[in-house]
Structures are given as structure tokens and as C-alpha cells.
Amino acid sequence: MGYLRVLELYSGIGGMHYALKESGIPAQVVAAIDINTTANQIYKHNFPDTPLWNKTIEGITLDDFNKLSFDMIMMSPPCQPFTRIGLQGDIADNRTKSFLYILDILPRLCKLPRFIVLENVKGFEKSSARTLLIKTLIDCGYTFQEVMVSPTSVGIPNSRLRYFLIALISAENLSTQTSSKTFDAFPHLDESESPLHPSFLSPTCISTGLPEEEIHSGLVLYKRESRMDAQRKMNQNHDLSVRQIQDFLEPQREENMERYLLSPKTLLRYGLLLDIVQPKCRRSVCFTKGYGRYVEGTGSVLQCCMETEIDSVFTGLDQLSEEEKLQQLLKLKLRYFSPREVANLMGFPQHFSFPENISTIQQYRVLGNSLNVLVVTKLLQLLLSSRPGHSAGDEDSAVGCSSSFCG
Ligand SMILES: C[S@@+](CC[C@H](N)C(=O)[O-])C[C@H]1O[C@@H](n2cnc3c(N)ncnc32)[C@H](O)[C@@H]1O
């Protein structure tokens, strides 16, 4: 196989591009397209040689797309129309317009791309946008697989459950574009379920092997979390298939990280809502674009002082005066993960960097919008190893290999 010509839509800071590079697939991104000027600046900084179009996708003509003559589309369409906390406007949301435009363009291209990779949030799988996507793929003769995957499945201690679709054109449709031979084995997964996952993924929730009472005895419900949440976190920390947080921390001395310490105001106001992890933990919650600005539900914070027991700080905290509360919470030395550490947990390679003028808050924002590079790397490898001719080289083998997506 020669170099693949890849079109990267909604390119952001280039999470898909990094995954492509990490996958080892001989490929070249022939155009990356995004309208976010901050993200584009970061993309350009890291991929100076890639043509980057600062244009709305719906403003690009069929003719322009045809001229790019691409073999693969990688895309992460805007997720706000599908998120649980959003209004779930789905296809009625203006932000889905560009995606509908892509679905309209796809069947009309002179040459259908052989491969498609799409990422979106949990919630997309139930959307009308997804129904239209599947209909378009079937009409164009793609075989495809949909999975819900979290980075914990590939050993990264960070939850980021996302919808992924990988699609492959059936061999006979490369020129004719008529047949609709497909398969669809979509496991509607929840992170806590044991998934029907591709073979590279380890189960997302592994039994700790500890007796129930032993687990319960370690549970102290000092914070505003349910017993089930506390139990799940404890189970995650016992999952040896996942690496420890400390592997993803910056090698700097802690005094250099002082600027990431949580302010007294934040500690007092949100202390009981924080998701606190320690370097030896094997979990953290999803980092969103609000990390560093908002506290609740935007990502974990790190306990830097290990001499203080977390239980001793939180037990009876409610009965203390504000000043005493603060003194207790300060003992833990809680800090935000730095943008570099968030990037590490999202699988970005070491050589990924930000231009100097991009503020910390902007860095968190674009990272929160991005994706886990390692997960996409594995999916790309899976997709390419399933292509017609890769193994036995005949049509049956194409569909047969594709079925291996199910694990
Ligand atoms: C979920 S983010 C994609 C993140 C990307 N995969 C990354 O690694 O950073 C969606 C991106 O789509 C861009 N976008 C939204 N609507 C667009 C449109 N109509 N045309 C071009 N880009 C658009 C946003 O600026 C945002 O960067």
C-alpha cells in the first residue's frame, strides 16, 4: 500500500493526526480543516507542513473536496448537540450543519474514501445524526464497526468514554459505489459493563479479586459521593491492567508546580466535590474544556502531600470553622494536573507542544475538546489491518477481518 491521503476534518489540535502518526500507517494529511483560531495556531505549531484550512466545512465545495483526492477521512464533529448536559439539539442544532453537509457530499464524491474514522461523545449513538451517518455508509457500500471506548481499556488511568466508528469500503465498491454489503455489531456499552470490545481492548471494569467485605471496610464516605461511586473508584485503583497516575506526571520538582495549587477559595467552596487522586491511583475522571476554570465534574485533582491521610482530613470536616477547614484541606496540597500532564493522560506524544502565547486556560480548553490519541491509534491499526487484501486478499476476507472488530 502506498501513502494514504488523509483528510482531517474538525482537526482541532490534531489528536487524529497524532494517532495517525503513532499508528505507523504510511500516510499524509492532505488537508486539516477547522475554524477555531487558537486550535489552528497549535495545530500549525506542531504540524507546520500540513495544509491547514481555516474555513467552515460547509463552505468547501464538492469540487474542492474532489481535488484533494483523499483515501481516508478522520473526523470529530462538534459534540455539544449530543452531550447529556447539553440541550441535545441533535440534527436541529446549527452545529450539526457541517456534519450533515459531509453526509450529503460523501456519496457525490468522484472517489469514495476507503476508510472513515469518526469520534464523538457518549450520546451520539442514540442520535438522529448517527442514524443518518449509518444510512449514508450503507448506501455507499461501507462496512463499519461502532464501539464505545474509554482510555482505561488501553491501560491509561483516565476515563473518557467516547463513541467511535471505523468504516471500510467494500472492495467492489471502490469503483462502482453501488453495493450495500455491510455488517453492524454495535455493542451499546456502558463503561461499567463488560464490553464486546475489539481485541486490543481490555475489559473496562475488571474485578479486583478482593472479597466484598474487605473492599467495604476501606470505604469512608466523607465526601458527596455515593457508596457505588466510592466502590467503583476503589475497584479501578485495583485494576493492574491500568498504569498508575505517577507515570504521567511531569518529572519536575513539586515547587515548580505551585502555580497549579488549588486556591483557598476553591478548597473551601468545592472541597467536598473534588475528585482527588494520588500518584499511585490507577484512575482519573475525564478532563473537560472547563478544567482549571470550573471545579465540579471537569477533571481530577492531584494530592501532592502523601504524609497526610485523606480520610483524616475529611472526617468531621463539616463540624470545623472555615479557618480550621481550610487548614485541614491545605494539608493535602491539592493541585490541578498541568496541561502537559493532561496531554500525557490523553496519549499525546512528548514532542507535542503549545506555542508560548497560549494561556494555561486555553491549553486546558483545547485539550478538553480533543481525544485520546492512543485509543484512536489502536482503532486505526485495527481498521487498516482489516482492509481488503491485507491478509487473504479476497472479498470474503475483508468482511471476515472486519468482524474481528467485535473481539
Ligand atoms: C471536538 S473538536 C475536535 C477536536 C480534534 N479532534 C482535536 O484533536 O483537537 C471539534 C472541532 O470542530 C471545529 N468546528 C466546529 N464546527 C466547524 C465547522 N463548521 N467547520 C470547521 N470546523 C468546525 C471546532 O472549532 C473544534 O475545534
Image: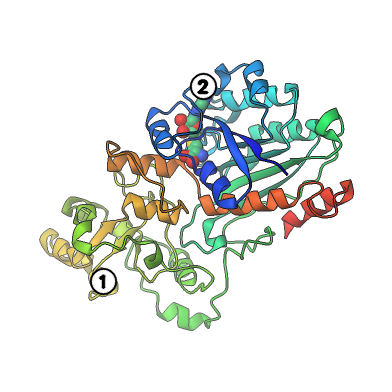
Please tell me which residue is depicted at 40% across the width and 39% down the height of the picture.
Answer: 366
Query: Sequence-wise, which precedes: disc 1 or disc 2?
Result: 2
Q: Amino acid at mark 1?
A: Thr
User: Camera-side residue: 200 or 286?
Assistant: 200
Nearer to us in this view, 111 or 308: 111
Instruction: Work out which residue is located at the far front of the displayed protein and give it.
Output: 2
Tell me the kind of residue under disc 2.
Thr
Q: Which residue is mark 2?
A: 56
Question: Is label 2 in a helix, a strand or a loop?
Answer: loop
The answer to which image quadrant residue 131 occupies is: top right
Q: Quadrant of residue 200?
A: bottom right
Gap between marks 1 and 2 measured at Cα: 53 Å
Closer to the camera: disc 1 or disc 2?
A: 2
Q: Is residue 36 above or below residue 275?
A: above
- Residue wearing tag 1: 315
Question: Dot 2, how many residues are within 10 Å of its Cα: few (below 14), some (14-19), or many (20+)?
Answer: some
Mark 2 Cβ and ligand 1 under 8 Å apart: yes
